[in-house]
Amino acid sequence: MPQSFEVRTYGCQMNVHDSERLSGVLEEAGYVREAGDDPADLVVFNTCAVRENADNRLYGNLGRLRAAKRENPGMQIAVGGCLAQKDRGEIVRRAPWVDVVFGTHNLGSLPTLLERARHNQEAEVEILESLDQFPSTLPARRESAYSGWVSVSVGCNNTCTFCIVPSLRGKEKDRRPGDVLAEVGALASEGVLEVTLLGQNVNAYGVEFGDRYAFGKLLRSCGDIEGLERVRFTSPHPRDFTDDVIDAMAETPNVCPQLHMPLQSGSDRMLKAMRRSYRAERFLNIVHKVREAMPHAAITTDIIVGFPGETEEDFEATLDVVRRARFASAFTFQYSKRPGTPAAEMEGQLPKEVVQQRYDRLIELQNEISLEANQQLVGSEVELLVAEGEGRKNAHTERRSGRARDGRLVHFTPEGATDGELRPGDLVHTTISRAAPHHLLADGGVHRHRRTVAGDRWEAGQRPKTSGVGLGLPSFGAPSAASTDGAAEQGCGC
C-alpha cells in the first residue's frame, strides 16, 4: 500500500507555495495525500519563524502526535521551513520522535531523507546554507483549481532589524523571466484564472541579471498569456518601487487594481531604526501616484506597533500616515522579539500594556477608514471570482463568497441569473448592497454567471499539478507555443 501524507503549513504565502512543492515531490515519490480523518503515515510541518509563538505552536503540535506515533511505529514526522532552518538539531533534541528535519533550501531532499531515516532508524537532519536547486525545478501539487502562486525570486537582500527571514532564506535569487512566464502559462493552460507573483521583495526582481525595470516588464508580459484573467503580486518594498511598475499595473488589463505595500511605521525615526530605506513622505508619494493612475485601487499594508524605542510621538506619526494613506485594510502586528535579530538586543523594549493600548487604537482607526472606503462601493457592480472557504458563516447565512478584482472579500446571495450550480473558480457579477470594515455584502442576487474550466476542475475534484519548470530564456514575452504545450503535457489536471 502506498504511504499517505499530510502537509501542515504555518506562515506566509511563500510557505504555502513551498508546501505545494513538498506535496508535488512526495507524490512523485509515490506517497498519496491523506483524505480521511486518521493521522497520515507521514506528517510534514512546514514552519514559520517570524512570530514569537512559532516555537510553542510547533512543539505543541509535535507533542500531540507523539501518542499517534507510539500506536503506529511506522509513522514518520518531518519538520521543515524557516523554524527548522533556525533551530536545526534543537528540534530533535526537544522532540526525539521527529524523523527528519530539513531547511528552506532543500525541499527536494525530503523523500531521500525519509528513506534514510527509515533505513537507519534514526533522525536525519539536513540544513543547507544555500539552495541546492531552485524550488521552481520541483513538481508542485497546487491547492487551488482557480488561483496559483508563482515565485519570481527567493531570499532577500534587505537588513530590516526586526526580520529574521534573510538569515533563514538567504540572499535574493531571481528566476529568469522565461522561467516565470512558462510556469504562469502552464497554470493558465490548466484553467487557472488568477496568479499571484511572489517574492520576499518582489519588485527588487531583476537585481541578479541587472535590470531594475524587470518587474514592470514581467507584469506586462503576463498580460499576453491566454486565459489568465487576474494577476496580483506581493510584497513590494517602497525603496524599489518605480513608476514603470505603476504604469504596467494601470495599462495591463489582467493586472488587478490592488497593491499591498508594507509601511511598518509612519515615523521616520522608527523607519531608520528598522533599517527601512525610505521615509513616510516617499511612501505616501507612491500611494498618491498609484491612485492617480488607478483611482479605485485598493491599497493595503503591514504595520508594526511597539518597535523598541517607539514613543507616543512616533506612534502618532503612524496614525497620521494611516489617515493620509486611507488604506483599504491593514495587517497590524504587535512587535515580536526574535532572537538573532538586531532589534531583539535594542534598548527601549516596550511594556506589553503600552503596545496593546497603541495596537487597539490603530485597529480602531483603521476599521473606521476601511468601513468608510467600503461604504463608498455600495451600489457599484463587481466581478467576483467565486472562492472556496472564504465565508465562515456561509452555511448559516446561505451566502457564497468571492474576491473582487481589487481583492476585497464579498459575500453574496447565490440567486438570480445563475447558469447552473455556482462553483469555486466561476465568475459572477453582482451589486454591492451593504458594507462592513472587513467585507462587503451583495444581497441582490447574481446578474451574470460565467462557468469556467477552473470551476469544471473544482467540481471534478481536480487540482493542477505542474512539473518542475527549468530555466527559461532571459527575455520577455509570452511563452512560445512549444513551451506552453510542453508544460501542459507535463502538468496533468487530476
Image (cartoon, helix red, strand yellow):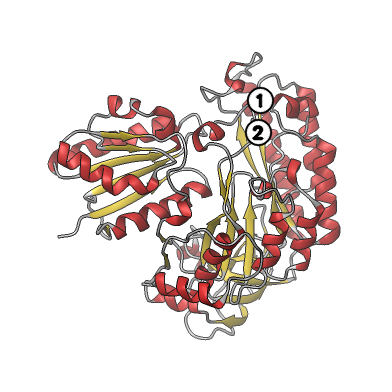
| Residue at image point 63% right, 67% down | 230
Q: Residue 304 carries which label?
A: 2
Q: Could you tell me residue 347's position as x and y percent?
A: 65, 13
Residue ID at (39%, 34%):
84
Regarding residue 68, the answer to whether it shows in the image is no
Secondary structure under badge 2?
strand
Query: Are discs 1 and 2 less than 8 Å apart at CB?
Result: yes
- Looking at the rendered structure, the secondary structure element under dot 1 is loop
Identify the residue under disc 1. Answer: 307
Q: In which quadrant of the rendered image does the C terminus lie? A: bottom left
In this image, 126 relative to 216: left or right?
left
User: Residue 160 placed where, x, y %?
Assistant: 65, 30
Q: Can I make out residue 90 in this image?
A: yes
Which amino acid does the dot numbered 2 rest on?
A: Ile
Label 2 crowd (10 A; few <14 / some 14-19 / many >=20): many
Separation of disc 1 and disc 2 at Cα? Answer: 7 Å
Res 331 quadrant in image: top right
